[in-house]
Image (cartoon, grey):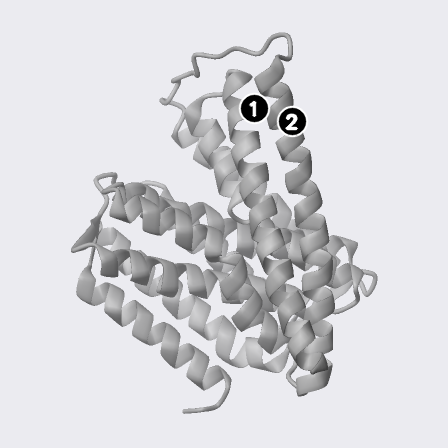
Amino acid sequence: MELGIWILVFIGALIILIKGADWLLDAAEKIGLRMGLSSFVVGVLIVGLGTSLPELISSLAAVLKEVPEVVVANAVGSNIANILLVIGLSALVTKRLTVSKNLIDSELPMLAISTSIFLSVVYDKVVTSGEAFFLIAAYFIYIFYTIYSGEGDESKSAFSFGRPDKVMMLDAGKLIIGVVGLLVGAKYLIDAVVEISILTDIAPGIISITAIAFGTSLPEIIVSMRAALAGKTEVAVGNIFGSNAFNALMVVGIPGIITSSHFLPIDEKTFVYGVPAMALATFIFIISGISKTIYRWEGMMFLLFYALFILNLFEIL
């Protein structure tokens, strides 16, 4: 009975967390455009950050609740889900995902570099405070390079920042509600993880790399699926680049600085199964990105790989 209640708390908190991120993202995007930011900057700084907020907030809540092993497991699990599950489903619902932009120029190398940096940091099963600072610095370099390489997009919104109007105030209110939703959802999500872990004798890291990672990847799934069905395949694929870089660098980096233990431990299952699976999934994604087309059969293979990862994680296979 108690387990059932905590599972309901977990699901409810996850819904609040995701909805809070959705409201915050929507309001922040509108406010950014009304302030005259270019659509490219809004896309990189607001949309890219917004879809990864659930991962970040839940990881911050984890270190504050003193379950730091959740952090790396959450980031690793989310990146695996983003590639194998999100791209797999997006390719499955369309005949193929095609990207016209040459991804070799910037996106693919930056994804490879950010993933390599993350892998070099976690090889010893811990992330120290110094390494966390390094991850954050790497992300700012990533953002700078992304904005610099896309500086040709100077399109501005028709709105300009001026006296706050009724619409602006409504968006500000929506943004505040979104932040509150994120904080409340994250608190009860981690509370539920701890209690479910105790009641089922399943390590928090395992719950994080599966259930939390899947749940916090729902914004990416929704955005990419909608984009794929609408024929906007570049959005479906491009959404994953910024999200995975943010997860690998900031979702681990920021909690790594504020943790009271001065380091983030990596549980055995995440290190043995999760980290290699993330590296392999990223490599496959990069190879697919070079050809600029991901076919339906590749999407099915991505989904199969994800299923195999989950089965291996629970030692069913």
Residue 211, x across and y down, in percent: 54, 70
Crowd tier of the residue under label 1, counting other residues whose Cα lies within 10 Å: few below 14, some 14–19, many 20 or above = many
User: Which disc, if any, is residue 172?
Assistant: 2
Residue 25, x across and y down, in percent: 54, 38
Q: What residue is shown at x 58% (from left), y 56% (from top)?
A: 15
Quadrant location of the C terminus? bottom left
User: Which disc, if any, is residue 269?
Assistant: none
Q: What residue is shown at x 56% (from left), y 51% (from top)?
A: 18
When the figure is inspected, residue 182 is found, relative to residue 44, above or below; the finding is below
On screen, residue 106 versus residue 20, left or right, reads left
State the separation of the CA atoms marked 1 and 2. Answer: 8 Å
Quadrant location of the N terminus? bottom right
Crowd tier of the residue under label 2, counting other residues whose Cα lies within 10 Å: few below 14, some 14–19, many 20 or above = some
Mark 1 lies on residue = 31
Task: Tell me the SS state at disc 1.
Answer: helix
When the figure is inspected, residue 163 is found, relative to residue 85, above or below; the finding is above
Q: Are marks 1 and 2 in contact (CB under 8 Å)?
A: yes
> Which callout, 1 or 2, points to the residue nearer the camera?
2
Q: Is residue 68 visible?
A: no
Residue 288, x across and y down, in percent: 25, 58
Q: What residue is shown at x 63% (from left), y 69% (from top)?
A: 8
The picture quadrant where one finds residue 59 is bottom right
User: In the image, what residue type sits under mark 2?
Assistant: Ala
Q: What residue is shown at x 66% (from left), y 48% (from top)?
A: 182
Residue that protrudes farthest toward the right in the picture:
260
Q: Is residue 271 visible?
A: yes
User: In the image, what residue type sits under mark 1?
Assistant: Ile
